[in-house]
Image (spheres, grey):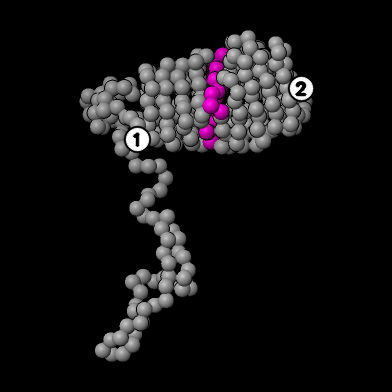
Amino acid sequence: MFRLEIFEPRILLSADGIDADPPEADLVGEPGAIVEGIDPAAGAGAAAPTIVWDGSTDGDGDGVSWHDPLNWDLDRVPGAGDDVGLDTGGATVVHSTGTTRVESLAGDGALRLSGSVLEVATTLDLGGGVTLDGGTLADAAVGAATVVAATRSTHNRLSGVTTAGDVDLSADFSYLRIRGGLELAGGTVHLSGNLAGLGIEGSQSITGTGTVAIEGSGSSPVQIEAVAASTLVIEPGITLRGGHGVVGGGRVSGSALALVNRGTILADLNGQVLEIDGRGGGSFTNEGVVEASGGGRL
């Protein structure tokens, strides 16, 4: 952003008399006014990439592995401080080992995190989305057009992530752990797969504005559960809604979940039950809204 202040015009004495110094630009405003605008040098939108995926287009990389230096235009893998461009024409790039930290990540590509960790310091915008297959996505601010999907691995994890896009647990037995809190910036977490699960690691809060949709349709309900003894706080602005699901207990760990609701819990799936399970030492504290509508039951 630049700021341009308009001052009184200068008076010049020329051979022809007294003239106002003509402005170099046609500016309209009162003396002392501030004109604000976008600094052309600052650019707009996503940062220009410092390193770009080229895959096998130049005849060297394997076209799949994030870790192959020859898949990148600089013939090195991205690292801290890099704004990464991942345009793959729809192909999936696999990140499969270790921990990588980058500044930002954007493009039309798809990314699969398989037993590895990707930390994104700022924004992540991938048209092909991110699939967690035993991997962890950390710190990222995920854009509205990016879907984060989880497989059935119980090691899938979001850690300190903010998302404006959807989180997809529609596959049967899909599973996702939450660590470091989860902020929804208009996004929705969809739990619809048979026995799909959201695992809460320790004391966590779901904050921001958005929805956790329990949309169970299989033979067994979906579950939001504890991973070890855990507390989940549903903050104001968050709606947990749906049916054919259980909130509480620990199917994977056998541990208890303490649930604190400061937002809205809504059983609204016709003919289905949204169960808040306090068994096994769990608890439920309501400081918000809990109700049933549309044929749903609590």
Q: State which region is magenta.
A: 162-181
Give the percent coordinates (x, y) of residue 89: 36, 31
Determine if residue 47 is in view.
Answer: yes
| Amino acid, disc 2 | Leu
Determine if residue 277 is in view.
Answer: no
Disc 2 is placed on an element classified as: loop
Q: Is residue 74 magenta?
A: no
Question: Left or right: where does residue 47 sit relative to residue 246?
Answer: left
For residue 279, above or below residue 13? above
Where on the picture, by quarter, is residue 49? top left
Please rate how many residues cluster around mark 2, counting C-alpha atoms within 10 Å: few if below 14, some from 14 to 19, many from 20: some
Which residue occupies the foreground of this view, 96 or 200?
200
Label 1, label 2: how far apart the Cα atoms are: 48 Å
Question: Left or right: where does residue 128 sit relative to residue 52?
Answer: right
Which residue occupies the foreground of this view, 75 or 56?
75
Give the percent coordinates (x, y) of residue 222: 64, 17
Where on the picture, by quarter, is residue 281? top right
**Which residue is found at the position 38% from the left and 28% from the top?**
101
Please name the residue that numbered disc 2 is placed on.
298
| Amino acid, disc 1 | Gly
Disc 1 is placed on an element classified as: loop
**Which residue is found at the position 48% from the left and 73% from the top?**
30
Please name the residue that numbered disc 1 is placed on.
81
Give the percent coordinates (x, y) of residue 148: 50, 27
**Which residue is found at the position 57% from the left and 19% from the top?**
201
